[in-house]
Image (tube, grey):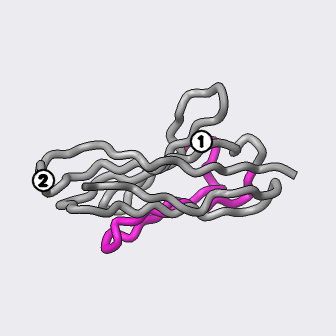
Amino acid sequence: QVQLVESGGGLVQPGGSLRLSCAASGNIFRVDIMGWYRQAPGKQRELVADTGSGGSTNYADSVKGRFTISRDNAKNTVYLQMNILKPEDTAVYFCYARLWPIATMSPYAYWGQGTQVTVSS
């Protein structure tokens, strides 16, 4: 069974930093895109950043220059370093991965359970 396990959320003051981690585990043949989405109360889920297996990256305009996504392909893990956090970054952050389980050898989208990030003084 494939699952994504996130860690690293919490409460931080404006201007502070947090680092999120997400590890994909289970019988996995290949991991393609890994990334992070977020959903604030009353708003739609939105892409924060994602990265391809070759290292390409994509960021939402609202986080460019403040957030950095990276991954460790050997560990099937993706990280999100969040700096200069703002109150508007407050949301539940969800890890996302498109991967090929060994059981099916076809691509599927998987989501983590979500981790709360609150930016407040």
Indicate the amino acid at tag 1: Asp
Residue under circle 1?
A: 61
Identify residue type, mark 2.
Ala
Using the image as rendered, state which of residue 81 and residue 43 is in the foreground.
43
Residue 71: say if magenta: yes
Q: Residue furthest bottom?
A: 74
Residue lying at the far right of the rendered structure: 121
Q: Is 61 within the magenta? A: yes
Q: Position of residue 108 (x, y in %)?
A: 24, 43
Circle 2: is it few (<14), some (14-19), or many (20+) Cα within 10 Å?
few
How far across and how far down the image is residue 5, in percent?
Answer: 44, 59
Q: Position of residue 109 (x, y in %)?
A: 30, 43
Q: What's drawn in magenta, residue-wise?
A: 60-85
Outermost residue toward the front in this view: 1
Task: Tell me: residue 107, above or below residue 24.
Answer: above
- Residue topped by disc 2: 103
Left or right, 19 with reference to 96:
right
Residue 58 in view here: no
Residue pictured at 17% horizontal, 61% vertical:
29
Quadrant for residue 83, please give it: bottom right
Q: Rate crowding at label 1 as few (under 14), some (14 to 19) or many (20 or more) other CA atoms within 10 Å.
A: few
Front disc: 1 or 2 = 2
Name the residue located 40 percent from the left edge and 65 percent from the top edge. 77
Q: In which quadrant of the rendered view does residue 4 lie?
A: bottom left
